[in-house]
Image (spheres, rainbow, N blue to C red):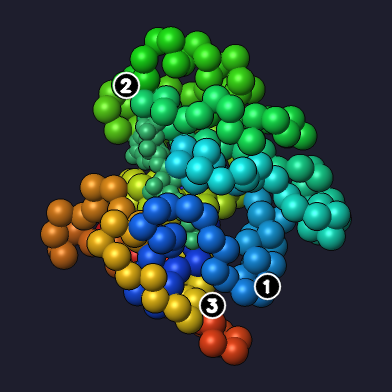
């Protein structure tokens, strides 16, 4: 089953109260240098980096491989110097002026659903290198993942949030590892995004269960790796 889709790692830095950003959703890099390094090391072992529309357009991110050091790591692993980039925007609200479209160092793939208005689809088609339309309302992630594997030969993918996308990926059961950095601060606030927002699991019985694979404490930060349990 898994070999027909990419191996997916989900990576996030969270506060001690599970938030991924303050209530105003302005990106604040609250992780340490170590956490930053982890993000680029995970990118350096992935064919593609994926994020949701808000993560991409609220902050000038390019989802690229980072500095020369990490690009060399990629080349040593036999990967292309620049990773593929995937943006999820089910109804096409992604800002066409987002920074990501200004850096053309590697293909940008847009995943969307049939909910996207025709005009927006046309505009985003002109900006992205490829567009996959999957699902009527919510994006059909299992089908999209299989398409990424067969069409773009993506074997490893790192999903970098935000909360809405993480939730959808976990509910679709297409996540193979969860990398969490628990940072020593509390942001609080009902409106602040958390690791997995969106629709969520409807009951405890249906929740994503995780097995702790490894953990490491460095100063006041905890670096955890979980494996979601199947079935
Ligand atoms: N601490 C961290 O590690 C970290 C990492 C990443 C992001 N962040 C923060 O997280 C915040 C953004 O998170 P967010 O939850 O607001 O947004 P998000 O997940 O980045 O993007 C949400 C958008 O993605 C699309 N999408 C997500 N799930 C979908 C689904 N199931 N079907 C179809 N489309 C789907 C939708 O686009 P359409 O509206 O076009 O349908 C949705 O509006 C920002 O504040 C950012 O700084 C923190």
Determine whether the residue tagged by mark 3 lies in a helix, strand or loop: strand
Determine whether the residue tagged by mark 2 lies in a helix, strand or loop: loop
Q: Which residue is mark 2?
A: 115
* Mark earlier in primary sequence (1, 2): 1
For the point 41% across and 61% down, which residue is it?
22
Residue 11 on image: x %, y %: 52, 60
From the viewer's perspective, tell me whether residue 199 is left or right of residue 181.
left
Determine whether the beta carbon of the residue marked 2 sits less than 8 angstroms from the nearest atom of ligand 1: yes
Q: Which residue is mark 1?
A: 33
Q: Quadrant of the C terminus?
A: bottom left
* Mark earlier in primary sequence (2, 3): 2
Where in the image, quadrant-wise, is ligand 1 located?
Answer: top left
The picture quadrant where one finds residue 152 is top right
For the point 73% across and 50% down, which residue is it?
65
For the point 69% across and 62% down, which residue is it?
41
Q: Which residue is mark 3?
A: 223
């Amino acid at each position: 089953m898994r070999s027909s889709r990419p191996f997916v790692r989900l990576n996030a830095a969270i506060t001690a109260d599970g938030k991924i950003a303050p209530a105003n959703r302005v990106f604040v890099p609250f992780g340490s240098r170590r956490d930053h390094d982890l993000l680029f090391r995970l990118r350096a072992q992935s064919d593609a980096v994926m994020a949701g529309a808000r993560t991409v357009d609220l902050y000038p991110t390019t989802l690229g491989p980072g500095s020369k050091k990490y690009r060399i790591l990629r080349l040593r692993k036999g990967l292309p110097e620049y990773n593929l980039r995937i943006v999820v925007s089910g109804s096409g609200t992604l800002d066409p002026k987002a920074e990501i479209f200004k850096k053309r160092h590697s293909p940008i793939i847009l995943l969307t659903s049939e909910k996207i208005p025709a005009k927006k689809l046309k505009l985003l088609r002109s900006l992205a290198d490829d567009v996959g339309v999957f699902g009527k309302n919510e994006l059909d992630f299992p089908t999209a993942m299989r398409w990424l594997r067969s069409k773009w030969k993506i074997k490893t993918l790192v999903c970098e949030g935000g909360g809405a996308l993480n939730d959808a990926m976990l509910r679709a059961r297409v996540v193979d590892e969860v990398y969490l950095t628990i940072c020593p601060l509390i942001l609080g606030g009902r409106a602040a995004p958390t690791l997995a927002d969106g629709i969520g699991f409807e009951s405890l019985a249906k929740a994503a269960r995780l097995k702790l694979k490894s953990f490491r404490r460095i100063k006041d930060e905890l670096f955890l790796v979980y494996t979601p349990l199947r079935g």
